Amino acid sequence: MPIGTLLAVSIQMARRAISHSTISFGLVSIPVEVFPATVSKSVHFNLLHAKDQSRIQERIFCAAEGKEIDRSELVHGFQIQKGKYVSFTDEELKKLESAAAREIEIVQFIPLSKVDPVYFVSAYLLGCGSGAAKAYHLLTVTMNKRQRAALAKFVMRGKEHLVLIRPYGEMLMLHTMHYADEIRSVEEIDPDAKASVGASELKLAERLIEDLSKDEFKADEFQDTYREKILRAAEQKAAGQKVSSPAAPRRAKVIDLMSALRDSLKSNKKGSPEDTEEEIHRSRSSTTRMRRASQSRSQSRRRKHA
């Protein structure tokens, strides 16, 4: 099947509703259909045997019995301690899922601006269900006018999700969300992230950000260049042609922050880098003084504990 046809088939599949549900809050119930909001166009590969280009097979092997087993013999194991499990069958998990409500139950409305994007996982479009057009659009218009989003609970694919519903054009969009205990702390990654910043360094960085600033995000200005390279290479291989691959751009190692900022401004052809020489000199002097002061404090602490 041609590459273009495969992409068209995946897009057609994404137009099918993956679930039917009802938005409920108070005494209001609005039937909706749940659709994926995005279509993955990532490149996928199959593993082949290099010798004869045949697809390999993955088989289920039981290490304890030393033999292959059928998929019907599998259960889901939850590890309670190292090497010890409790098991669940598909039926048991299905019963636990069905015990939860299938409705999208709104618990509160909040300002969308108060939700950090780090909580968002996946996006789904909520289509209007049969006979619910007026209630659906009334909710959408009201949320738009009040600049509010709805937090709700929703069971999907075996798990109860915290979800956020927000207006998206004339429709509603649903985002599955992480729970608070799934978000990693900044201190966990880099407890020493705070560092002193000189006034001149800040001024140069602000100028660079201003030079690269736009008033709005235009998604169609960005393309997946990796996918384009893979598709082009696949077409060349299929045609028996030699695959051409452009050389990767070389990036210089950044040694000095101020020099990097100055060079970035110069490459953008905005501002006058010459005007910043005095600022650079002042910032370097200030940075040197701060470094020496820090070293002096460290030495004093060491002498005190000696």
Image (cartoon, grey):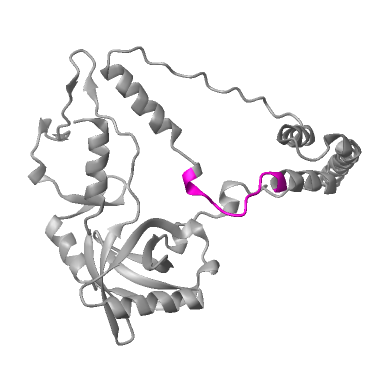
Residue 65 figure quarter: top left
Choose top left, top right, bottom left or bottom right for residue 23.
Answer: bottom left
Prevalent SS, magenta region: loop
Could one spot residue 17 in this view of the protein?
Answer: yes
Please tell me which residue lies in front, 55 or 245: 245
Up the image or down, 27 lies above or below 4; here it is: below
Residue at the spot x=15%, y=61% of the render? 92
Is residue 27 found left or right of 206 in the rendered image? left
85 vs 245, nearest the viewer: 245
In depth, the one of 186 and 4 nearer the eye is 4
Query: In this image, 96 relative to 104: left or right?
Result: left
Tally the marks.
0
Query: Which quarter of the figure is the N terminus placed in?
Result: top left
Residue 8, position as x, y percentages in the image: 25, 42
The magenta stretch spans residue 214 = yes
Q: Position of residue 280 (x, y in %)?
A: 86, 37
Query: Image height check: is 297 above or below 173?
Result: above
Quarter of the C terminus within the rendering: top right
- The extreme bottom residue here reads 27
The location of residue 115, given as percent across then percent down, is 51, 65
In magenta segment, residue 118: no
Q: Which residues are magenta?
A: 210-220
In percent of the image, x 18 and y 60: which residue is there?
A: 93
